Image (cartoon, rainbow, N blue to C red):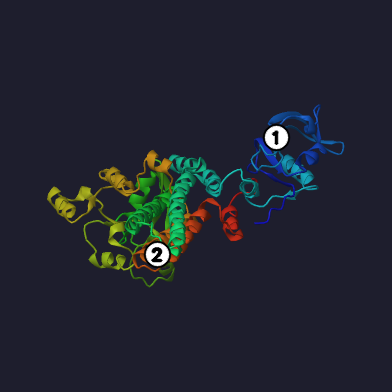
């Protein structure tokens, strides 16, 4: 990506009324630009890096605000350039007035451009830049911990170790190609084949972390599915401990899906109360049911809820567009059944609960997250957290498998070395050794302007 190098400015704090607002300026002319509007006993160009000066922002002779200005000199700043931060009173009007004055001599920063410059100036790696975005959007303790571990370099270090191995094997192959031309054989093919297999397995294990990483970042999607009036909305409300969903004794009350999220043991759980799976002549309900199908397809877990009648046809319908492994069968209203009948449902794989007496609800919550529990040690080892990273590692897996096959089939060491080079390139894309404008734009476009 072409580095523009001009001076940019933006508001870094949310717009609104608060104690302070912060404006950030970065670039070669950031200090002179601020000096034109900032009046203090200390000239900004004379103070040391990471020091602040108190003074006034004035537009000609009109006082705008009393502010605190902090200077960060290149290369010891967030972007690697000269950076100035202005802390003013948290007034929307005041903040915008100062920004307007700055924009007379600077350009408004693009979304994520400060972090983008930090990457382009080698202040942070690409996975760390992505982690900055994850930190800003973290909604739970564990998602924040995962983002911080990535920002500290856990994933980058894991990728670099894999790259080191790949480079080592490529070097062996290149040397062997030279030896072969001289009529010498040095390479132990069986040993290298085993090493490549181990490398592929490590890559596959890394790919598997992507599922957990996406859930940590975006939340576990849980759909509540079942016939009308089995108590989906009641369970929905019991999880949320609120009356967000409308509950009535009449079938078909939920005509569209409802979505809410909770923090469950540090994990973000997104619940979708769907319109149910059924045939209907009501045009509005048809739209709601169609949307429900889309939600269910994208869900990590589906709670198939019954209140006594097993609804085999609806369960079969559900299996048409989701796998049985994602379904948790739930018997609701257990307080209305004798113990013997409940035991029959347990034998059939149903989890028993009742919204009325709250029995079984805690067990249901634990069942939802039992497969996504992740330890601090796993986070520290480095996990994938977005589709870009997952796609790149999958490509590395495919290329490594091709290298194994070319070695086994005696296609020539040149082919094996080429396949490993493809694997290396895919891994290098993750940490930013190889990048394209499209990749960078995709990463930074969802950042806020002031970051």
Q: On residue 89, which mark appears?
A: 1
Check if mark 2's residue and mark 1's residue have beta carbons within 8 Å.
Answer: no
User: Residue 360, position in %: x, y?
Assistant: 26, 45
Disc 2 vs disc 1: which is toward the camera? 2
* Residue at the farthest top position: 41
CA distance for labels 2 and 1 = 60 Å
Mark 2 falls on what kind of element? helix
* Residue at the farthest front position: 183
Q: Across the whole image, how many numbered discs are drawn on residues?
A: 2
Q: Is residue 271 visible?
A: no
Is 13 displayed left or right of 106 in the figure? Answer: left
Pick the quarter of the image with the N terminus: bottom right
Q: Residues within 10 Å of mark 2 (few under 14, many from 20)?
A: some
* Residue at the farthest right position: 61
* Residue at the farthest left position: 340
The residue at 80%/28% (across/down) is 42
Disc with the residue nearer the chain's start (2 vs 1): 1
The residue at 51%/58% (across/down) is 425
Work out whether residue 94 or residue 392 is closer to the camera in this orientation and state it: 392
User: Residue 277, position in %: x, y?
Assistant: 33, 65
What residue is shown with label 2? 402
Q: On residue 272, which mark appears?
A: none
Mark 1 falls on what kind of element? strand
Is 37 displayed left or right of 400 in the figure? Answer: right
Q: Is residue 238 visible?
A: yes
User: Residue 305, position in %: x, y?
Assistant: 28, 56
User: Residue 50, position in %: x, y?
Assistant: 68, 31
Pick the quarter of the image with the C terminus: top right
Q: Quick check: 354 above or below 187?
A: above
Work out whether residue 450 or residue 429 is closer to the camera in this orientation and state it: 429
Work out whether residue 111 or residue 232 is closer to the camera in this orientation and state it: 111
């Amino acid at each position: 990506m072409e580095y523009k190098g001009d001076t940019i400015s933006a508001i870094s704090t949310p717009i609104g009324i608060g104690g302070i607002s912060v404006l950030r300026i970065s670039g070669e002319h950031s200090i002179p630009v601020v000096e034109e509007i900032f009046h203090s006993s200390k000239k900004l160009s004379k103070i040391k890096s990471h020091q602040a000066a108190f003074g006034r922002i004035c537009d000609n002779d009109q006082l705008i605000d009393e502010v605190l200005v902090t200077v960060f000199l290149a290369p010891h700043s967030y972007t690697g350039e000269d950076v100035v931060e202005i802390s003013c009173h948290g007034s929307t009007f005041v903040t915008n007035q100062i920004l307007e004055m700055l924009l007379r001599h600077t350009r408004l920063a693009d979304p994520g451009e400060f972090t983008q410059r930090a990457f382009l100036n080698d202040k942070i790696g690409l996975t760390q830049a992505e982690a900055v975005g994850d930190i800003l959007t973290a909604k739970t303790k564990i998602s924040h911990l995962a983002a911080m571990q990535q920002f500290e370099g856990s994933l980058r270090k894991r990728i670099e170790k894999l790259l080191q191995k790949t480079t080592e094997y490529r070097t062996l192959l290149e040397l062997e190609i030279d030896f072969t031309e001289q009529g010498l054989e040095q390479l132990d093919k069986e040993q290298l084949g085993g090493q490549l297999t181990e490398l592929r397995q490590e890559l596959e294990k890394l790919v598997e972390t992507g599922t957990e990483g996406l859930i940590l970042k975006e939340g576990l999607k849980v759909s509540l599915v079942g016939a009308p009036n089995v108590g989906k909305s009641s369970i929905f409300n019991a999880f949320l401990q609120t009356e967000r969903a409308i509950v009535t004794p009449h079938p078909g009350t939920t005509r569209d899906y409802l979505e809410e999220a909770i923090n469950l043991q540090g994990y973000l759980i997104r619940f979708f109360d769907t319109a149910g799976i059924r045939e209907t002549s009501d045009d509005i309900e048809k739209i709601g049911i169609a949307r429900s199908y889309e939600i269910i397809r994208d869900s990590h877990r589906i709670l198939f809820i019954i209140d006594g009648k097993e609804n085999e046809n609806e369960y079969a319908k559900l299996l048409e567009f989701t796998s049985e492994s994602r379904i948790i069968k739930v018997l609701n209203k257990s307080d209305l059944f004798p113990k013997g009948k409940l035991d029959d449902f347990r034998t059939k794989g149903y989890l028993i609960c009742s919204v009325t007496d709250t029995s079984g609800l805690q067990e249901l919550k634990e069942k939802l997250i039992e497969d996504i529990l992740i330890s601090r040690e796993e986070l520290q080892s480095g996990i994938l957290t977005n589709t870009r990273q997952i796609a790149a590692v999958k490509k590395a897996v495919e290329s490594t498998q091709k290298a194994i096959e070319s070695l086994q089939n005696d296609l020539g060491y040149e082919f094996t070395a080429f396949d490993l080079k493809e694997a290396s390139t895919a891994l290098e894309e993750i940490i930013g050794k190889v990048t394209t404008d499209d990749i960078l734009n995709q990463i930074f476009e969802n950042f806020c302007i002031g970051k």
